[in-house]
Amino acid sequence: MQTQRKTHNKYCHKPHFSNRILRFGKFGIKVTSFNRISETQLKSLEWSITRKLKELSNNSKKSFKLWNLINLNLNLTKLSQESRMGKGKGAIYSKAVFLKPGVILFEFDKVSYQQLLEAFNFIKKKIPAKTILITKWN
């Protein structure tokens, strides 16, 4: 099990891979604005996507493929309200990721464009950032 660590001046400035092009699936959800997504928001997004796609594919077995390409790299810490200056950084209460325009959140495969378009219109309201649906044309 990976332990959570508090970070201070240890953030990676350059990503090791490009997450602006589709690599796994035929369709994807791309962010077009700056925003921060927390761990609970990301889990609820993934859950609602799978639920909606299962509903659209007539409750069959999970015939579609879904890739979550977001790595939560921020540990959010918090001190109590009454604490004075000093005394350390505080306890970790959640994880998050800072999104930049052009980053792909999810990739999909083995699903039709119409089903994905309907699911995207349902999910678009739940994502706190502005997003678009992208496709890979072979």
Image (cartoon, helix red, strand yellow):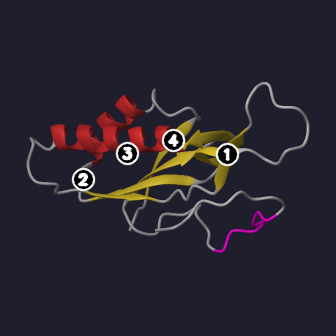
Q: Residue at x 58, y 35 (%)?
A: 130
- Residue 59's quadrant in the figure? top left
Provide the secondary structure element on which disc 3 rests: helix
Q: Which residue is mark 4?
A: 132
Label 1 packing within 10 angstroms: few (<14), some (14-19), many (20+): some
Q: Which residue is mark 1?
A: 91
Provide the secondary structure element on which disc 1 rests: strand
Label 3 packing within 10 angstroms: few (<14), some (14-19), many (20+): some
Observer-side mark, 3 or 1, equals: 1
Q: Amino acid at mark 2?
A: Val
Q: Amino acid at mark 4?
A: Ile
Image position of 18 (left or right of 10) = left
Q: Amino acid at mark 3?
A: Glu
- Give, as a single range, the part of the protein colored magenta: 10-16
Q: Which residue is mark 2?
A: 111
Q: Is residue 92 depicted above or below 8 in this figure?
A: above
Q: Residue at x 66, y 52 (%)?
A: 74
